[in-house]
Amino acid sequence: MPNDSVFRRLSDPPDGEVTIRFDGQPVAAREGDSVAAALLAAGFAALRTTPAGGNPRGPWCMMGVCFDCLVEIDGVPNMQACMTPVREGMEIRPMSGARSLGGGDG
Amino acid sequence: MHRTEFAIIGGGLVGMATAWGLVRQGRRVTVFDEGDIAFRAARGNFGLVWVQGKGVRLPDYARWTRLSASLWPGFARELEEETGVSLQLSKPGGLELFLDEGELDTHAADLKGLRDALGGDYPFERLDGTALRKLVPSAGPDVVGAIFGPEDLNCNPLYLLRALAQAVVGRGGRIVNGAAVRGIKPDSGGFILDNGGQWAAERVVLCAGLGNTTLAPMVGLEAPSWPDRGHLLITERLRPFLDHPTAHVRQTGDGTVQIGASHEDAGFDDATSAQVIGRIARQAARLFPVLENVRVVRSWAALRVMSPDGHPIYDESDIHPGAFVATCHSGVTLAAVHAMLLARLVAGDDPGIPYLESFSAERFRVPQAV
Amino acid sequence: MADHVPLIVIGAGPAGLAAADTALAHGLEVMLLDEQPGPGGQIYRNIGNGDDERRAVLGADYAQGETLLPVMERPGLDYRRGATVWEVTPDRQVFFTEQGKARAVSADKLILATGAMERPMPFPGWTLPGVMSCGAAQIMLKSSGLFPAEGAILAGSGPLLLLLATQMLAAGARIGAIVETTPARNFLAAAQRLPRALLAREYLRKGMGMMAALRRSGVPWYKDAGGLQALGTNRVEALRFKDGAKTRELPCGLLLLHQGVVPNAQIARSLRLDHDWDDMQRAWRPRADSWGETALPGIFVAGDGAGIVGAKASAIQGRLAALRAADAQPGEAAPLRRALARELAIRPFLDRLYRPADEFLQPADDTLVCRCEEVTAGEIRAAVRNGSLGPNQAKAFSRAGMGPCQGRLCGLTVSEVIAQARGVSPAQAGYYRIRPPIKPVTLGEMAALADESDEN
């Protein structure tokens, strides 16, 4: 569950609104946001739990180096949220431990 | 001058298993190991305790391997209890998958021949595509069949090495590392080792893998070997989907999938080759198409310690009794017999294995009948 | 089908952009590969796209990055955005993936301009959600105009910490606190390097101006802080630290950390290039000559990926490498070398001032050092006790470095911990052996390239 977001945007351009979904909930984002930035801005902190210990993690580096922001995007597991730009209608799910073989997480 | 009772040259799987076998007998042991970036076949290991296919050309090797596999669960239990390190041992039996009917036929014929040579005592089963896919639903459509080996096991080879090292140290064994042993001199019934310092040992066991080839002649032995480069790919962690280890693809206890089993003579070069990796990937994708969109996170190349015929070399020096050599490329599979039987031989006891002589390097001096 | 180009530049930050520019000016066609969605690297991230308000908030140094952009329009530049390089061979074959498709291209010359990443800052709780690097917050600001408006705490040491604070204030943020961990004794030690740093007095002036503005802002600013702990159950809720004799606990919903930047040298490592330990920067740098050429002919390193030098110096190094790659007249290099010397003058002072505090180089036993596989510093020390001489043995025993980040976040810490446990320098302890794939790549992508190369 997100807390009230600590993030604010400098200014909202007139267009470029994008709606994505995280764990079934709609999230308002902007064109050009990475998935990670959009989710952080919406107040989410944890995006997954770790395979090794089941511990909650969120983005650390935002530049593709740490691999802590892994989420399932449109059915593809272990995608780096910080390296994926948002797209209208994108379905994002948190990674719960190790991925499964196919698309989804179960 | 430092002193020790048993000097084990090489801290890989052969050395550490033998060292543990000795400290369990209350012996004083020092293991000599190199630096952090050494060839270390032990780190390139697939983790299979593999029986099937071993010894087709030397039935005694099949006997030795089966003996080790049968001792493995007890060996693992003892090691786990002593160290608290889980070896992730599983015993579902192993599979070698085939993409070519002809190769499957040849392999099955080889195993039938081995079974005959062993008087009928050699369990294996040929599975056609349908039977295989019942066991392994994720096997790809190109897989024509498999050989099932009920005695094949698998484990985590890195945790095995770690547990052995911990157990050796825990029982008062010493590990001296950072410098290779450059010279061994027989001296008044014992041996003087030079690793930059000087060590006197009553008995010495060469477990230095490829390094044995240079060290062996110093104590009147020979241990010919060549580096057989194998590549490994390791994937991201997956939820369990493959219970049975296969010869080329297996899922580890951590959920990662290990993919490998290439062979090349690339000299003493353990760098990875892009072409080889690509071919391994392609074969793996044919064997298990479900792995196509799974990510490879790491790759490895390591140099197997390959004797001229691929079978182990065990010898005690005639000229310098108390010097032993142990060379093999199956340090995981044979870890149990190394710890429990070879260690006794080295300590001067009779482990009761009459066919151990088959593994003497003498065999390389006898011209082979064609 | 494998392609061949005269020059491949990996990384479109200041070093890569400048290298491409100089190479093109000397008639060399360039393929420029970068994994981000646009040029600029991290320091000039999203340059050219922001509006006036964003540029004003980010400051003049950031805006200056625009002077590197004209290269994007030059004919002869083949720029691939979103291209993730996963293997580079010593004979200059580059394997990368773009839009899910793997490609192989070879080149006569190769410039690695892979830039920097933030040094890990391990301490209890650093892996909690809501704890990020200061660079991460800057990326959000540069790419999306997002800033932490309410009560974030900035903790650590280094110019980027203060720069981010300045930028956040310019945006209108209320900063919870700055908890600076720069050890007090660093100031005295750094002062000895001040005379040399005066050659870069403009830089010093800017820094002091920034600090003065921060002091005026009234943001609580704790100095020489230690004993950091991030507290919280499922996300960070507070930062506890020692402030002199007092222990403080400040609530926060976002904790931004910084402990300097270090070279992102995975590709150079995977090529088995020699790396030298820089004890001042507390990191390794790939060995190269004064043009940036490594022991592998035709392979160059330039910019922060070859040792932290900053954006301006990175650009100059990129140009020097490109001159050499283009076999240009050596005389052209002279003005560049003079400019480079001026830019490097500040470094000894900065490196000494912002040398990480011991607690982050030698975390406590129960602190995670490998985030991916959740391995603690204590487990690394145990590996040393059981015979591990270096990170590769420790990796085999503990799984540290085996996760998807491939040792990027744990490598330096593991080397430091092993070094101290053995009583040797990190140079003697060594670093992970890095092998391809440099970034995770699917089995299918690898297999597809095998099919192609076997056809050829």
Image (tube, coloured by chain):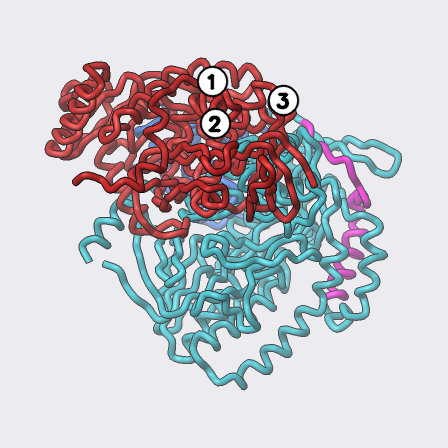
Chain colours: A blue, B red, C cyan
Residue shown at 53%/26% (left/top)? B164
Q: Amino acid at mark 1?
A: Ala
In this rendering, is residue C12 above or below B317? below
Q: Chain of mark 2?
A: A
Q: Nearer the viewer, residue B72 or C270?
A: B72
Q: Amino acid at mark 3?
A: Arg
Q: Amino acid at mark 2?
A: Pro
Please indicate whether residue B92 sits to the left or right of residue C213 in the image. Answer: left
In this rendering, is residue C3 above or below C246? below
The residue sitting at the right extreme is C245
Q: Nearer the viewer, residue B164 or C252?
A: B164
- Please name the residue that numbered disc 3 is placed on: B171
Please identify the quarter of the rendering in which residue C443 is found. top left
Please identify the quarter of the rendering in which residue A26 is found. top left
- Magenta span of residues: C203-231
Residue shown at 30%/50% (left/top)? C102
Q: State how far apart marks 2 and 3 are (Cα).
A: 34 Å
- Please name the residue that numbered disc 2 is placed on: A51
Nearer-N-terminus badge (3/1): 1
